[in-house]
Amino acid sequence: MEEYKNDLERLFFENTGRLIHKWRHYFEIYDRHFSRFRGTDVHVVEFGVSQGGSLQMWKEYFGPKAKVFGIDVNPNCKALEEEQLEILIGDQEDRRFLDSVKERVPRIDILIDDGGHTMAQQINTFEALFPAIDSNGVYLCEDLHTSYWRKWGGGYGRAGTFVEYSKNFVDLLHAWHSEDEARLSVTDFTRSAHSLHYYDSILVIEKRPVEKPFHLKTGEATVSPFRKQEPRSGVVSERASSDGVDDMNGGERVQNDLEAEDRAPLSDMDGLKARLRKEKERHRVTKDKLAAEKARVASIRASRSWRLTGPFRLLWRSVTRVRTGMRRG
C-alpha cells in the first residue's frame, strides 16, 4: 500500500474520475496553506476548469460545507456543474468579467489561479481579485514557470512577466520601514498581506490584517557595547551589538554612520570608495524601480483592453494633430 504525504496526494493518485493534471510537488504546498479550511464553509475560486477533476478534488478535500467555483473561458465546462460546484464562464484577462466575479461569488476565502498562465491574465486577475479575498484568506498563483517561457509572454528578467511584477510585493511587505515614502509607502497590500511564500512555480500570499510593527525588549542588558577604532580618523565609536536591537527605532546609529561617510573628505581614498559604494547602491535601487514601472506598462500594453482601445487612441491622436494645426493656422 503506497503511503501518501497528505490527503490531497491520496485523492489525486486514487482518482478514477475526471482528469486532474498537477505537478507532484504542488500537493504539499496546497495542504500546508489550505488545511486550516477543511471542514468549514470555505468558498474556493479556481481559475482553469479543464476537465473538472481538480474541482472534485477540492470538494472532497474541504468537505460537505465547502462551495467551489470554477472559472474557465470554455463554455463546454458549464456542463461539469454538480452539487457544491458552480462554473462561471469568462475570460480572466477581461477586467469587466473579473469585476463581475466579485458580484457573483459572495465570499472568496481561497483563490487559485491555474488559468491561462499568460502574463496579462495572471496580473489582471491578481489586481482585480486580490482585494476581494477575505481578510484572512489565501491567494495562490501556480505554474509561474511560464514567466520564463517566451511562448507565454515570459523570459528570464523580461519586463512584464508575473514573476518580475510580483517581486514588488517584497518591497510593499516592508513598506512600514521605508525612509523614502515618495517611492515606497504603505499601501492596502502592506496592510492586508501577512506573508509571501515562493515555491518552485507557485506564489502563495497569506492575508491577515496587519498593523505597523513594533519591537520590544525584555530581560537585562549585561554585555557592554562594542567599541571599534575607526582606521581613517582614529575615532572610537560604539557599534550596535550583535542582537541588532540597540537602536532599531529608525536605525539612528546606522543612519549616523552613513551621514558620517557622506561628510568624509573627498581627498580620503577610503571615503571615496565608501561614497562610490553608496552611489552604486542608489543607482541599483533606481534601476530596480524603473524596471518595475516598465513591467507594469508592459503588462498594460499586453492586455486585451489595451488592444481593443488601440483604434480609439489612434483616432484621438489624429484629432489632436488636426486641432493643433488649426490653432497654428
Image (cartoon, rainbow, N blue to C red):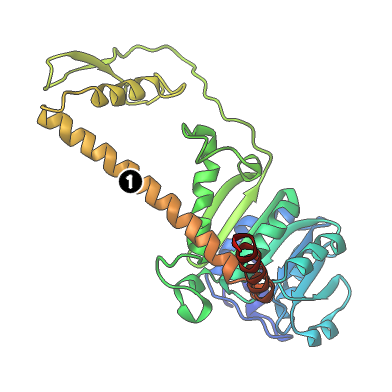
Which quarter of the picture shows residue 53? bottom right
Residue at 31% x, 14% y: name it: 223
Front position in the image: 4 or 281: 281
Residue 114 in sight: no
Which quarter of the picture shows residue 260? top left
Labels in figure, total:
1
Kindly give the residue lying farthest to the right in the view shown. 83
Residue at 44% x, 53% y: name it: 290
- Residue 270 at what x, y percent from top left? 13, 31
- Residue 259 at what x, y percent from top left? 30, 23
- Residue 101 at what x, y percent from top left? 81, 65
Name the residue type under label 1. Answer: His
Mark 1, residue position: 283
Q: Which quadrant of the figure contains the C terminus?
A: bottom right
Residue at 60% x, 53% y: name it: 205
Q: Dot 1: within a 10 Å radius of its alpha carbon, few (fewer than 14), some, or many (20 or more) residues? A: few
Q: Secondary structure at mark 1?
A: helix
Question: Residue 231, relative to residue 208: is it above or below?
Answer: above
Q: From the viewer's perspective, is 315 left or right of 97?
A: left
